[in-house]
Image (cartoon, rainbow, N blue to C red):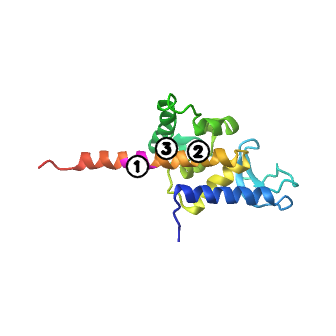
Amino acid sequence: MHVTVDIRGAWKLLKAWYDAWDRDENRSHMEQYYSMSMKCEAWINGKARDQYEAVKPVRSVSEFGPMRTRYPGQIACIIESIRSVVTSRRDVIPAMDPLAVAEETLGSVDTWPSSVLTDMFYEEPKVSVSRRVAVFLHGNGVSAKDAAKLYKASQAAWRNVSETYVRVVYAVVQVPS
């Protein structure tokens, strides 16, 4: 059974996971994630352990960027929606786009694994999906606060784009009377 979480629930889960991974200094092999610096799957280890430990056997990821996902158009719209909301409100609230903040640490979304982009920008926020996103962000050094802002923005944009898509499809298929 998959449990869907709301934005507040996702933040609480994300914070709890980050705290658990940061608190357990001597534990190794807590989670697997794609390391942007190592360019392969790596382990989240406690702070007292090696932080650059590749998962063995080494597996590489072959699909990167939004255009290599199963939903390139929708994900591109969601990414653009996140960027445009912040840009259009900059005069009201001077804030940096949460995606741009993550990109400062991780590099352009075009270099992120497509599976992570699908989880972050397309899938419903189930606990398992939220955890995969949190593992990727934590393992690659994105703070809990910045991860939460990005996940919140991605889910809000996902809802807006999905609602717009449903309205457009409904308008196209509606038969005139």
User: Nearer the N terminus, badge 3 or badge 1?
Assistant: 3
The mark lying in front, picked from 2 and 3, is: 2
Residue drawn at (21%, 50%), measured in percent from left and top?
Answer: 174
| Residue corresponding to mark 1 | 162
The 10 Å Cα crowd at callout 2, few under 14, some 14 to 19, many 20 or more, is: many
| Residue corresponding to mark 2 | 150
Cα–Cα span, label 2 and label 3: 14 Å
Amino acid marked by disc 2: Leu
Secondary structure at badge 3 equals helix
Picture quarter containing residue 65? top right
On the question of residue 22 being in view, the answer is yes
On the question of residue 71 being in view, the answer is no
The 10 Å Cα crowd at callout 1, few under 14, some 14 to 19, many 20 or more, is: some
Q: Which mark is residue 86?
A: none
* Highlighted magenta segment, given as a residue range: 159-163
Residue drawn at (51%, 58%), measured in percent from left and top?
Answer: 6
Q: Is residue 24 left or right of residue 41?
A: right
The mark lying in front, picked from 3 and 1, is: 1
161 in magenta = yes
**Vertical relation: 40 (above or below) 125:** above
Image position, residue 30 (x, y; %): 76, 61
Image position, residue 3 (x, y; %): 53, 67
Amino acid marked by disc 3: Ile
Secondary structure at badge 2 equals helix
Q: Is residue 131 left or right of residue 38?
A: left
Of 12 and 72, the residue lying toward us: 12
Q: Which mark is residue 75?
A: 3
Residue drawn at (73%, 57%), measured in percent from left and top?
Answer: 19
